[in-house]
Image (cartoon, grey):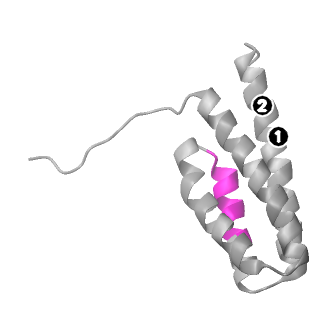
Amino acid sequence: MPTNFTVNYTVPNDLKMRYLARKKDEILRCLNQIENRDYESVRTLAHQMRGNAANFDFSLLEQLGILLERAATAEDFEQTKFLLEDVMQAIAGLSYRLSQLGSGEK
């Protein structure tokens, strides 16, 4: 019985947009939580993001998730806040690009 299966599945853009909207809301909450030095909430979000962003073909968010998790684990306030802001910018850019693809622009 074969054990090496290749699945070629592309996530539909509407699901990607919903994922990005959810992440945006979560990052906004984390920006508030980090002001109270709640590193554990940020670390948990970053860990989840790095794991599931790859499933949506968002390698940038995956890499930012790795860096954000490290910063939150180290309890580095400045770096954590900086990376949360970077994630927000990345989400905005990805959302814009997906909306352009959805309108037929390539």
Q: Say if 81 sits above or below 3 in the image.
A: below
Out of 18 and 4, give the one closest to the viewer: 18
Q: Report the amino acid beneath label 1.
A: Gly
Residue that badge 2 annotates: 97
Measure the C-alpha gap from mark 2 to mark 1. Answer: 6 Å
Location of residue 29 with respect to 43 vertically, above or below: above
Label 2 CA crowd tier, 10 Å (few <14, some 14–19, many 20+): some
**Mark 1 highlights which residue?**
93
**Residue segment shown in magenta:** 58-68
Name the residue at 83% across, 83% down. 76
Q: Quadrant of the C terminus?
A: top right
Label 1 near label 2: C-beta < 8 Å? yes
Residue for point 64% across, 70% down: 44
Figure quadrant of residue 79:
bottom right
Residue 58, horizontal then vertical, whole percent: 64, 46
**Amino acid beneath label 2:** Arg
Q: Is most of the magenta stretch helix, strand or loop?
A: helix
Q: Nearer the viewer, residue 56 or 15?
A: 15
Q: Position of residue 28 (x, y in %)?
A: 84, 57
Q: Identify the image quadrant of residue 74.
A: bottom right
